Image: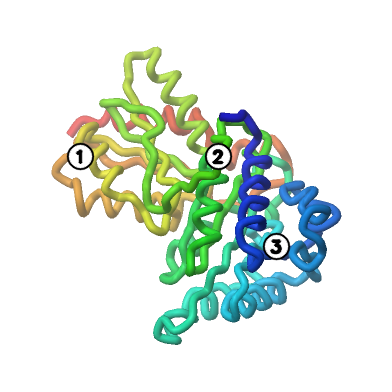
Amino acid sequence: MTVMTYREAVRQALREELLNDERVILIGEDIAEFGGTFKVSLGLLDEFGPRRIRNTPISETAILGAAIGAAATGLRPIVEIMYSDFFAVAMDQMVNQAAKMRYMFGGKISLPLTIRSTMGGRRSAAAQHSQCLEAWFMHIPGLKLALPSNPYDAKGLLKTAVRDPNPTIILENKMLYNTKGEVPDEPYFVPWGQARVVREGKDVTVVALSDMVDFSMKAAEQLATEGISVEVIDPRTLVPLDIDTIVRSVQKTGRLVVAHEACVTGGVGAEIAMQVVYRAFDYLVAPIERVGAKDSPIPFSPILEREILPDDRDVIAAVQRTLDYAA
C-alpha cells in the first residue's frame, strides 16, 4: 500500500489505462500542458504526447460530441468536464446521444466513454461552479454514475469505468482532491454496484455520498461518545445502486438518514429513501431523514455558503431526530 492523495490516485488510474490500451485518449479543457484546473492530468502529456492527451476548445457541447463519436468508432475516450455545472450546455449530447445510442442501434455498437467532472462547493466558487447534480444523471437510463469518496475508490472505480463498454460518469468532489488514503501498489479494480460499509453500527443507518462520507464519520464518532452506534454506508455508485446492502443495514438498525451535499428537494436521498420504504417498511421505527443543501443557489460568501451546505452537525441533528421519534 502507498499513501497518496485523491488527485494522485486518479492520475495513477489514468496513466495505467493509457498504458494498457492505446485506444484510450484524454480530452478536455487545459488538460495537456496545464494538467487541468485541478492538476489531475499533470505530466501525462510529457509521457503520452499530444495525440492522446488533447486540449479542446471551451465548448462542452463540442467536447462531448467529439468524444461520443470517438467512442462509437473504436476509441476509448476519457473526458474531463471542468465543472459539472457545465454539463448544462451539453445535455443533448449526454441525455439524447450518449445514454441512448447503444440501445437505439440494438446493441450493434458500444460506447466506451468515461466522463470525469467535479462537483460540490465549500470553495467560494459561487452559484455556477459549486453544484451537485448527480440526481440529473441518475434519472437517465443508459448512464452509469459513481461518486468516489476516497483515493482507493477514486482509482478503482475509474479503472473499471474505462473498461466498460457503456458511458460512465464519475463525479469527483473538489474538496477531496487533497485528502489522503492507502492505495494498493498493484493495479486493481473496484466493481460498480457494490456499496461499502464504512463503519458498522446498530442504532441508525447513515447512507452518505461523496464528501458527506467524511462528515458522517465525524458525526458517528461524536455520537459514539454519547453511546449512539451509527452505521455509515457509502454507496460508491448510484447507477447501479447497491440497495441490498442499504436494506440489510436498515433491517438491523430500524432507522435511516441519507446525506448528500446536493439540494434536498429532488435529490438522490429521496430515491434511496423510497426504495428502502418499498423493501424494508416494516423494519422502520422512525421516519427517514434527509440531509442536504438548502434549496438555494450556492452563495459566494463563505459565511453564507457554510449556512447553505450540510456538514457533520446536520447529520448529528438528523440522527437525533430519528432517535427522539416516538411512534
Q: Which disc number belongs to residue 26?
A: 3
Give, as a three-letter code, the residue at label 1.
Leu
| Residue at (65, 52) in percent of width and height | 14
Q: Amino acid at mark 3?
A: Leu
Is residue 300 rendered to the left or right of residue 226? right
Quadrant assignment for the C terminus: top left
Callout 2 amino acid: Glu
Mark 1–mark 3 Cα distance, whole angstroms, equals: 46 Å
Left or right of 100? Residue 176 is right
Q: Kindly identify which numbered label has been placed on residue 186.
A: 2
| Helix, strand or loop under label 3 | strand
Q: Position of residue 80 (x, y in %)?
A: 68, 60
Task: Give the alpha-carbon distance from disc 3 to disc 2, as whole Å.
Answer: 23 Å
Q: Does residue 270 appear in the picture of this structure? A: no
Q: Residues within 10 Å of mark 1 (few under 14, many from 20)?
A: some
Disc marking residue 284? 1
Q: Nearer the viewer, residue 249 or 317?
A: 249
Q: Residues within 10 Å of mark 3 (few under 14, many from 20)?
A: many
The answer to which quarter of the image holds residue 288 is top left
Q: Is residue 213 left or right of residue 32?
A: left
- Residue depicted at 62% across the width and 72% down the height: 75
Per the model, the C-alpha gap separating discs 2 and 1 is 42 Å
Mark 2: few/some/many CA within 10 Å (<14, 14-19, 20+): few
Asked if marks 2 and 1 touch (Cβ < 8 Å), the reply is: no
Looking at the picture, how far across and down is residue 155, in whole percent?
57, 45
